[in-house]
Image (cartoon, rainbow, N blue to C red):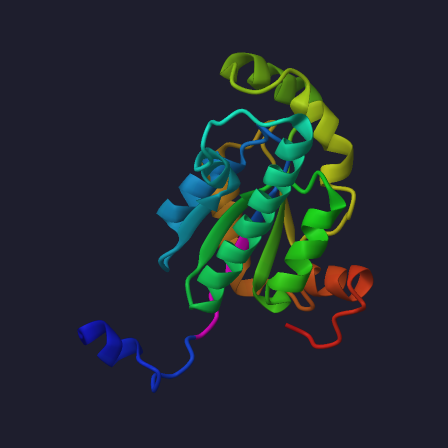
Amino acid sequence: MPEQAEFGTGSATPQRGRIIFLNGTSSSGKSSIAKELLQVLDEPYFHMPVDTFHGMRSRREVTPDELRLVLRRTWMGFHRAVAGMAAAGNNVVVDHVLSEQWRLLDCLGLFAARDVVLVGVHCSLLELERRERERGDRPTGLAARQLAQVHAHGLYDIECDTTTASAVDCAQHIRDFLPQRPTPTAFEQLRAKLRPDLTTAG
């Protein structure tokens, strides 16, 4: 088969892909920025939104305790899918909500830290509440409940504020930052601080 001939066991290990990791509350504009990034970035990128993974689940009714377990497993599977895409050499744009600390800790253990561009997506509470009302597909007050924890780790490679900046402006800002991003990356620093059990740098 042609595919086996090109990517068979004798082929070289692909270079790891970059992960542009957009973190912010619900309705902060992450998905809009991700879509614009796919238009302005020079290399091919895949947008992997966590909402797509949640949407794959069957609609069978489950108890609240079961739902918590299902949601946790969904997030864990999402993280591993992103890690697998990047490990195969694909560039990925991820939109994420780090509203529980274990999610960040899990990602720190899975992703090659030097290949992650951690982007803080901020938005004022008033604007978040306005967007929630306008969308009508999110629980009232969801973004407000997430706000304190989402940015609690306090460290980013680059940040943007969608209260006033458009998704296009944010995407261009991120694109222009990529060639000059400093090291150690935010993920490398967070990994050293929060995951000392990981002795080898990734």
Q: Quadrant of residue 52?
A: top left
Judge whether residue 69 can be spotted in this image: yes
Q: Residue 70: where, in percent of width, then height? A: 59, 39
Query: What residue range appears in magenta?
Result: 15-20
Q: Residue at x 60, y 46 (%)?
A: 73
Q: Is residue 67 left or right of residue 195?
A: left
Choose between 168 and 55: the one closer to the eye: 55
Q: Is residue 33 above or below residue 104?
A: above
Q: Which corner quadrant of the image does residue 42 belong to?
A: bottom left
User: In terms of depth relative to the viewer, which is nearer, 145 or 115?
Assistant: 145
Residue beneath the point at 58% across and 60% down: 116
**Residue drawn at 44 percent across, 60 percent down:** 91
Is 17 one of the magenta-colored residues?
Answer: yes
Q: Nearer the viewer, residue 161 or 187?
A: 187
* Residue drawn 72% across the image and 24% down it: 144
Magenta stretch: includes residue 129: no
